[in-house]
Image: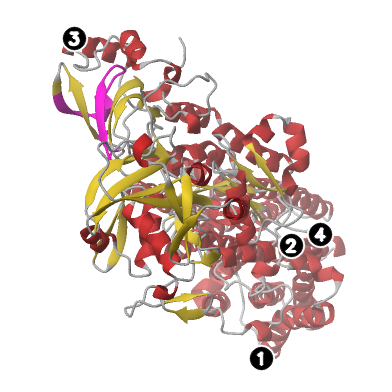
Amino acid sequence: MKPFWTLSVEQIAEELQTNLQQGLTEEQYQKHLRQYGPNQLPGKKGRTPLSIFLSQFQEFIVWVLAAAALVSGFLGEWVDTGAILAIIVLNAVLGFVQEYRAEKSLAALKKLSSPVSRVIRGGQHQNAVSTDLVPGDLVELEAGDRIPADSRLVWTTSNFSTQEASLTGESAPVTKITTPLEKEDCPLADRANMVFLGTSAVSGKARAIICQTGQQTELGNIAGMLQAIEEDRTPLQRRLEEFGKWIVYVCFVLVGIIFVLNLLRGGKIIDVFLTSVSLAVAAIPEGLPAVVTVALALGMQRMLKRHVLIRKLPAVETLGCATVICSDKTGTLTRNEMTVQAVFANGSLFDVTGIGYQPQGEFKLNQTTVNPDSYPELKKTLLCGVLCNGAQLVEKDGCFAILGDPTEGSLLTAAAKVNLWKKQQEQLYPFLEELPFDSDRKCMTVIRKADGKVIAYVKGAPDVLLSKCTHIEENGKVVALEPGHRQRILAMNNQLTGRALRVLAVAFRTFENAPPDYNADAVEQQLIWVGLLGMIDPPRQEVKAAVAECTQAGIKTVMITGDHKNTAAAVARELGFFTEQSIALTGEDLDRMSQEQLEEQVQHIAVYARVSPEHKLRIVKAWRKRGDVAAMTGDGVNDAPAVKEADIGVAMGITGTDVTKEVSDMVITDDNFTSIVAAVREGRGIYDNIQKFIHYLLSCNTGEILVMFIASILGWPAPLLPIQILWVNLVTDGLPALALGVEPMETTIMRRPPRKPHQSLITKSRAALLLIQGVFIAVCCLLAFYYVLFIEKGHLARAMTAAFLVLSCSQLFHSLNCRSMTQSLWHIGFFSNPNIIIAFLISLLLQLAAVSVPLLQKIFRTESLNWIEWIMVLALSSFPLWAMEAVKYLFRKKPFLAGLE
């Protein structure tokens, strides 16, 4: 069967067994319902609370922690077993709460899509639930209606148009026709005799016959593409899993070496085994999942205040490492409203973007305040746009709204700024007749009466209208239209279209006596030319600064739109991400390129115009193939496949469709591009903090392992008991690590280039530094042990107590180091993060209790120290802090620390 847009409505009615006046009979309807099924897309099955909760236990390190808890319980270390299990449960609960709340918030954002339609069945008009419609149903449409299914138009009023931006990316409404089209491969945006599910009627009325429903619609095809895209793990999830495996393997190897050395030294196998297992449990950073989850959850709450709803916790960090943002134009980078920018009249070009309506009737033009009456041709051009207009400018609560075609609405808005209001002008120029716009004439005429005369006001395509003109209004007089006039007008038209403006021309004709018949042939000739009006969907004012910040942060901005190339390139140039070296391509250009060619050129392409959903998928895949972390922002249904394919999908909360929101990782609730930049900034800060507390945990655990490892090599007694190792791990890995997770972000965070997508959580520079810091901690602990045991000749329990104190307290002092790898603690402010001071004090009190409270002394086998030993403990414990302050001072701007920023 041929495509529906190539067939006559009679042929379609015959094919679908329906009647163009009566619609389907009840018997035919039931038959079609059984044959085609309900008019709905196969929805994605919602996640149950139980499935969300169970998904929190899928990480590798969580399973390792569960195994560690099992071993600890087997050894009778019930305190540590309880601590590890509590961490696992806390991690799961926090992750569950955040993701469940996000799902609920998203559900609240959803809007019902055309729930009821007006349908004709058996000759009777009735309301029907849109999901019950079937091919062959006749539906009636008018301005404001959502289109319930892909349909072929049977008849329309002359001004019937639809807004298809959500499906095609076109910002301008599409005027519809009823005649068949010739091309079978006609692009979606050019199928002027069809209306589509997911779009809406803007003006006029129409009747249509439903041709495709549910999965068979254009929207259904996109939904099918979404199902074919596999879910991928975020960069943070992949890094944490790799890091977890790596740290577990390294810990097991080192603990195994210590186990063998202690056995060779003659230790009892059960004691050696207990010490080794305790060290293994302590060496594994069991606090990592909980701290990561808390950091992401708190970041998610901060983002919500900035109008960013996170649907998946790891997405908080992923946007922070994005290298490219692929953004839709309409409604995201632009306002999604047409605005008059230039008027050409009487040989002068007026920039009207700065016109602001004032009560006294004056406006600013070219930075100079003038009286609009000084420019009669400008006012006459705007007046013609008002009187030949089908839209309305409605005031409500001090704000104005456009009812009708946005292009016509932009003419009313520009005129209102110079105190030309349609309602007032229509009283002065009463309506007589209208000759609606059609695609053959490419113009529209409204005939009015004034001062006993009949005046026809005409607007349309400049070249067409110019051919119908014989005179021009110049300096307040009507003179013959000379070839020189025509050349200047056409040259200006080319100049304005070159600036990506949509250009309309206006003219008029005065009749001494009303013509006997108001038809186009009689009226639209011997016109008097007035002027040109150039309009565009302008960029959002705040977006330019947001794009500049992205550029400063090393993030490339790319526009992907269904609009025309010149328009898209002009918007991109104004926003600052389209330069002389940039390339703009159309969908046809992409069709001629192989995927390999696209991958080679993609980094130079800043604008993609007139593209389809398949093209958007290719673009995102090309970026990801290069190793970039690609973010895709979108609002329309046509954006959904690329939003899902991207590393991070960003949907618009206000204008975004439900389909796009459901596949996204985050939703911008105010549809503002600046909110995306705030999310990038927040994501980078969160990743910084994740690195800081991982650095802290690893350097502390390195110190613990080195203490036992060096003591085994030297043939010393074990400096720490298993329960002491586990206690240190519990006290130092908890609150201080959490406090580092909420460290205020550094001021230079948006002046850094993006991290390399495959960069490890621990860079070589950071690994070297944490190893040095681990050595500091280990040496301090071993010095305390050596002093009491070998210098003072004290008891082993007393030496263990000193080592126990220094190991834990030195890690607490070290937590202050980890607030910044390059900046001094005094530079960033000692109290700028009060959480870490509180965590330091609480952990310190717990540690002091373990060596001072008699009951705890028995549990941890500790003894009281004398005042000299306490001074030694304080000096050695604080040494890592002072040592690192010296290192930062000496090497702050050296290459050694370059990888830490």
Labels 1 and 4: the sequence-earlier one? 4
| Mark nearer the viewer, 2 or 3 | 3
Q: Which mark is residue 764?
A: 4
Q: Earlier in the sequence, mark 1 or mark 2?
A: 2
Q: Could you say which is closer to the camera, residue 817 or residue 213?
A: 213
Badge nearest the viewer, 4 or 3: 3
Which of the 4 image quadrants contains residue 889? bottom right
Magenta segment: 125-145
Residue 170 place in picture, x, y as percent: 49, 42
Q: Is residue 427 magenta?
A: no
Residue pictured at 56% horizontal, 36% vertical: 231
Asked whether disc 3 touches disc 1, contact meaning CB atoms under 8 Å apart, the reply is: no
Q: Tell me which residue sits at (61%, 82%) in the image.
A: 864
Amino acid on which disc 3 is placed: Glu
Residue denoted by label 1: 867
Is any atom of residue 484 visible in this view? yes
> Which residue is nearer to you in this view: 127 or 477?
477
Q: Which residue is mark 3?
A: 27
Q: Residues within 10 Å of mark 2 (few under 14, many from 20)?
A: many
Q: Is residue 690 left or right of residue 845?
A: right
Q: CA distance from mark 1 to mark 2?
A: 29 Å
**Label 4 crowd (10 A; few <14 / some 14-19 / many >=20):** some
Q: In the rendering, at what x and y percent does residue 16 appear?
A: 32, 11
Q: Secondary structure at mark 3?
A: helix
Amino acid carrying mark 1 in the image = Trp
Q: Nearer the viewer, mark 1 or mark 2?
A: 2
Instruction: Report, in whole angstroms, how far the alpha carbon at label 4 lies from the one at label 3.
Output: 74 Å
**Which of the image's four quarters has the C terminus?**
bottom right
- Where residue 43 sits: x, y (%)? 38, 31
